[in-house]
Image (spheres, helix red, strand yellow):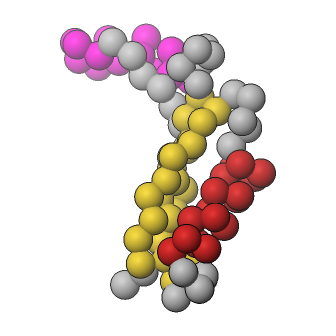
């Protein structure tokens, strides 16, 4: 069965996010008020073939930990749903 994983990888809150700081700083030039903090991360969509949802979950978790996220600087979360 195929599953769709929607993965978000973000920098740890404790770490400086220079891209986010730059965007937050420059929003004022668009004359937009009320934006306090911007964090830049990655959004990944992945289709996984697996025998069960738990197997798909394990595969996605392994890919995130070993390939997509730098666990020293980033954290990740994902949702998993059957592909339609």
Residue stretch rendered in magenta on the structure = 18-35
Give the answer, above or below, for where 82 lies relative to 13: below
Q: In what quadrant of the picture does the C terminus appear?
A: bottom left
Q: Position of residue 78 (x, y in %)?
A: 49, 53
67 left or right, relative to 18: right
Residue sitting at x 59%, y 29%: 11
Give the answer, above or below, for where 69 lies relative to 32: below
Residue sitting at x 48%, y 26%: 39
Residue sitting at x 64%, y 64%: 58
Q: Give the total of numbered labels.
A: 0
Which corner quadrant of the image does residue 83 belong to? bottom left
Q: Position of residue 34 (x, y in %)?
A: 22, 13
In this rendered view, identify the residue nearer to me: 44 or 23.
44
68 left or right, relative to 3: right
Give the answer, above or below, for where 66 lies relative to 15: below
Query: Within the magenta stretch, is there residue 24?
Result: yes
Q: Secondary structure of the magenta portion, mostly?
A: helix
The answer to whether residue 57 is seen in the rendering is yes
Query: Within the magenta stretch, is there residue 71?
Result: no
Which corner quadrant of the image does residue 47 belong to? bottom right
């Amino acid at each position: 069965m195929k599953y769709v994983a929607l993965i978000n990888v973000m920098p740890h809150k404790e770490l400086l996010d220079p891209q986010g700081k730059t965007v937050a700083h420059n929003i004022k030039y668009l004359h937009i008020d009320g934006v306090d903090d911007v964090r830049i991360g990655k959004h990944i969509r992945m289709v996984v073939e697996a025998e069960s949802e738990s197997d798909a979950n394990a595969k996605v978790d392994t890919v995130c930990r070993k390939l997509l996220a730098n666990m020293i600087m980033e954290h990740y979360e994902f949702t998993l749903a059957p592909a339609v």
